[in-house]
Structures are given as structure tokens and as C-alpha cells.
Image (tube, rainbow, N blue to C red):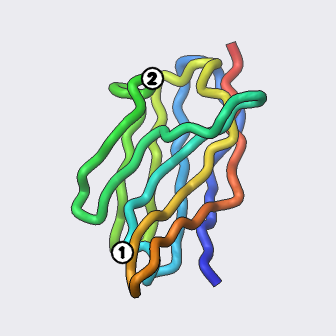
């Protein structure tokens, strides 16, 4: 069973920092582009940041310069360092693994972790 286990959410004041972690099963992690998405109340889920197996990163315009995604291949873990947080960053954050192997596209999600930024 594929598992993506997130941690690190919580409540923080505007301007503060949080780091999210997502641990994945080894076989999934090494073959997947790992990403963080978020979904605010009443809004659609959106991509926050992604990192390929080769380390190429991509960010939503709204978080560029504030958030950093990284992956530790030895620990099968992807991180999202969030600095200078704003109230509009408040959302449930989801870890995602995307890849294609054995002739099939794969798309896995974590359970989500709440991030709340107070003004």
C-alpha cells in the first residue's frame, strides 16, 4: 500500500515559518516527481511546488521567494520550507507523488496537513 505521510503543519503568525515533511515508500519516492498542493476553504486545490527526481523545481508565483521545496533521497522524504507566511497561505497542504512506470501513470496523495496563518 502506498503511503505518503505528512507532518509539520500548525498555527503560525504572519511572517513566521513552518516546514512540512512528507515521507514516502522508497519505491514510489525514487520514481516520482514529488509535489505539494494546497486547498483553501471554498477554493480549488492548487500546486504550490514540485521537484523532479533530478532536482528540478517549480513554484506557484504566489510562493516564489518564500517557499523552498527539497527532497532527501536517502530518507525518501520531501520538504516544504515556508517562510514569510501570509494569512492567504492558510490551507490544507497535501503531498503528492506522480510518476509513470510499468506502463501506467501513477498519482498518489497524502492525507493533508492544516496550515493556519494568523494576521
Q: In which quarter of the image is residue 38?
A: top right
Which of the image's four quarters has the C terminus? top right
Comparing 87 with 2, the one in front is 2
Which residue extends farthest top? 119
**Residue 37 location, x and y as percent?**
55, 44
Residue 104, image x and y in percent? Answer: 45, 79
List x then y, in percent, for residue 60.
Answer: 41, 32
Q: Which of marks 1 and 2 is nearer the N terminus?
A: 1
The secondary element bearing badge 2 is classed as helix
Against 8, residue 103 (above or below) is below
Residue 62: mark: 2
| Disc 1 crowd, CA 10 A, few/some/many (<14, 14-19, 20+) | some
Tell me the residue at 46%/46% (across/down): 80
Q: Is disc 1 placed on a helix, strand or loop?
A: loop
Residue 31: mark: 1
x, y percent for residue 17: 52, 31
Q: Is residue 16 left or right of residue 101?
A: right
Residue located farthest toward the front when viewing the structure as drawn: 103
Nearer to the camera, 32 or 89: 32
CB atoms of marks 1 and 2 within 8 Å: no
Q: Which residue is drawn at 59% across and 68% down?
A: 4
Residue drawn at (42%, 42%) of the image: 49
Amino acid at each position: 500500500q502506498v503511503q505518503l505521510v505528512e507532518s509539520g503543519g500548525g498555527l503560525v503568525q504572519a511572517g513566521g515559518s513552518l516546514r512540512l515533511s512528507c515521507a514516502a515508500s522508497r519505491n514510489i519516492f525514487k520514481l516520482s516527481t514529488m509535489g505539494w498542493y494546497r486547498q483553501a476553504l471554498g477554493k480549488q486545490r492548487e500546486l504550490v511546488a514540485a521537484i523532479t527526481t533530478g532536482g528540478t523545481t517549480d513554484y506557484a508565483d504566489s510562493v516564489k521567494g518564500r517557499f523552498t521545496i527539497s527532497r532527501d533521497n536517502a530518507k525518501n522524504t520531501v520538504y516544504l520550507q515556508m517562510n514569510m507566511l501570509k494569512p492567504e497561505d492558510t490551507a490544507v497542504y497535501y503531498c503528492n507523488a506522480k510518476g509513470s512506470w510499468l506502463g501506467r501513470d501513477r498519482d498518489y496523495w497524502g492525507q493533508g496537513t492544516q496550515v493556519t496563518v494568523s494576521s
